[in-house]
């Protein structure tokens, strides 16, 4: 089992599709083990998007991520990091495959609805960045036999 990290971005919240996005993860069989709202500060965004900090468009990314509070999620499942990345789709919503969240709900590079950790390592770092230990829950997933059978 892995736990991965997701941000439901202001583009989803402003458009009133946050519930649909969260619902996709639930329907897939992922277990929600953490969820809260937060307004993202400049400093947390500079840390979270450090690989983009030097880019000319970084200011626009910050504005976009601060357009409203976001919903932060911790999702648990077998190979959760890769599964959720696949569900998220390519960065550019115009190129993302239909059937993915970005492919179905976004027509933009910037306003692309969700963030999802891109590796197990970054999931660990990002979960620590946004959640305290007592905000990640352990509880029985009663549907587990139906969700996974023996594989
Ligand atoms: N982004 C953007 N313009 C770009 C590249 C990225 O606005 O040219 C934004 C976009 O919202 C993206 C986020 O910055 O989701 C982080 O970019 P990254 O390359 O890490 O892509 P992701 O992992 O989100 O697909």
Image: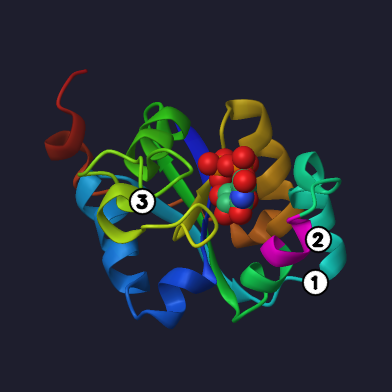
Q: Secondary structure at mark 1?
A: loop
Q: Position of residue 38 (x, y in %)?
A: 65, 75
Q: Earlier in the sequence, mark 2 or mark 3?
A: 2
Residue at image location 46% in from the left, 57% down from the top? 112
Image: magenta residue range = 57-61
Residue projecting furthest to the top: 151
Task: Quickly name the residue at label 2.
Answer: 44
Labelled disc at residue 96? none
Residue under pointer 1: 41
**Residue at position x 39%, y 44% in the image:** 88
Gap between marks 2 and 1, in whole Å? 5 Å
Are the residues at dot 2 and dot 1 in contact (C-beta closer than 8 Å)? yes
Foreground of the two, 141 or 76: 76
Residue at 60% of width from left, 79% of height from top?
69
Q: Dot 3, crowdedness within 10 Å: few (<14), some or many (≥20)?
A: many
Q: CA distance from mark 2 to mark 3?
A: 24 Å
Across and down, in percent, residue 104 comes to 25, 54
Report whether 96 appears left or right of 57: left
* Residue 59 forms part of the magenta stretch: yes
Residue denoted by label 3: 102
Where does the N terminus fall, quadrant-wise?
A: top left
> Could you say whether the residue bearing mark 2 is in a helix, strand or loop?
helix
């Amino acid at each position: 089992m892995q736990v991965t990290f997701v941000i439901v971005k202001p583009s989803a919240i402003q458009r009133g599709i946050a519930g649909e996005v969260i619902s996709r993860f639930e329907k897939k069989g992922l277990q929600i083990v953490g969820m809260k709202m937060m307004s993202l500060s400049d400093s947390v965004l500079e840390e979270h998007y450090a690989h983009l900090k030097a880019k000319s468009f970084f200011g626009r990314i910050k504005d976009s991520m601060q357009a409203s509070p976001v919903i932060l999620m911790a999702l648990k499942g077998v190979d959760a990091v890769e599964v959720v990345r696949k569900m998220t789709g390519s960065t550019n919503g115009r190129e993302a495959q239909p059937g993915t969240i970005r492919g179905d709900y976004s027509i933009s590079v910037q306003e692309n609805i969700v963030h999802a950790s891109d590796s197990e390592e970054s999931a660990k770092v990002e979960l620590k960045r946004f959640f305290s230990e007592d905000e990640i829950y352990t509880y029985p997933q009663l549907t587990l036999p139906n969700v996974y059978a023996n594989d």
